[in-house]
Amino acid sequence: QQPVQSPQAVILREGEDAVINCSSSKALYSVHWYRQKHGEAPVFLMILLKGGEQKGHEKISASFNEKKQQSSLYLTASQLSYSGTYFCGTETGGGADGLTFGKGTHLIIQP
Amino acid sequence: GAVVSQHPSWVICKSGTSVKIECRSLDFQATTMFWYRQFPKQSLMLMATSNEGSKATYEQGVEKDKFLINHASLTLSTLTVTSAHPEDSSFYICSARPGLAGSEQFFGPGTRLTVL
C-alpha cells in the first residue's frame, strides 16, 4: 500500500527549514528517501532501517519511528539546489521487494 | 559510487511496435533489479522485480505478456514493451540492488518512451 506523504508541496525562502513526513498503514522494514528533479531519475538521499534510527548528511537528516510507521525528512537552512520532488520509498517485507513510493512532496526554494 | 545505465535515453515509436530497454549495472553485480514506471507529475510505480536467472515477479495490474523482462546476467536486465500503444508512453526507470532488502537501490537515468 502506498505510503502517505505530507505536505504535497512546500514553498520556502532560501535558508528556511522544511519537514516532510511519510507514513504507512503497514509495518515498515525500511524507508528510503529520494529527491528527483524534473526529467531526471531519483537521487538517493538515505535509508533508515531500525526503529528510532536517525541519520543525516550535511543539512539533510531523517528519522524513522518504527512504532508509528512514520519517517520524517528534515531540510535545514535550505539551499536553491534542494528544489525538487522528494519521495519516500518503503519496504514492508524482508525479501526481494521493490520500493513502494509515496506521491511525492514538491519543494520550491526561492532566493 | 555505483552506476546504473539505461539505453536508450529516449525512444519514439509507432503504435504496435515493440521496444527494448536495457538496464546495466556498470561497476557492481546486481542480484535484484527493479523496473518502475512514472507518468508525468506522478510517483514511481513498481512494475516488476527481476532476479538473475529466474522469472520476474510482476506487480498486480502489470501484464507480464506485454512487459517482457529478462535478467540474463548479474549486470543486465531488459524490459521489452510489446505491441506498444500511446497509453504505454511513460518514463521507465530501472534500479539495481547489489545487496539484500534494506540496502540501497541505485537508479538508472530513465528511458522516456513516446508511442505515436
Image: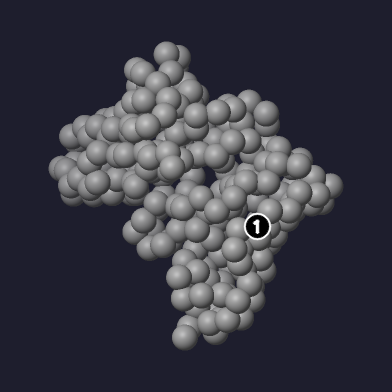
Q: Position of residue A75 (x, y in %)?
A: 62, 68
A104 relative position to A6: left or right: left
Identify the residue shown where x is 50% and y is 58%: A35
**Quadrant occupied by the N terminus of chain B:** top left
Subunit of mark 1?
A: A
The residue tagged with tag 1: helix, strand or loop?
A: strand
A58 relative position to B74: left or right: right
> Farthest residue toward the right?
A67
Identify the residue shown where x is 26% and y is 42%: B85
Q: Is residue B67 visible?
A: no
A16 relative position to B33: left or right: right
Identify the residue shown where x is 50% and y is 29%: B98
For disc 1, the neighbor class at 10 Å (few under 14, some 14 to 19, many from 20) is some
Amino acid under disc 1: Gly
Identify the residue shown where x is 59% and y is 63%: A58
Q: Is residue B9 visible?
A: yes
Which residue position holds label 1? A56
Asked where in the image residue B63 lies, by quadrant, the reply is top left
> Farthest residue toward the top?
B53
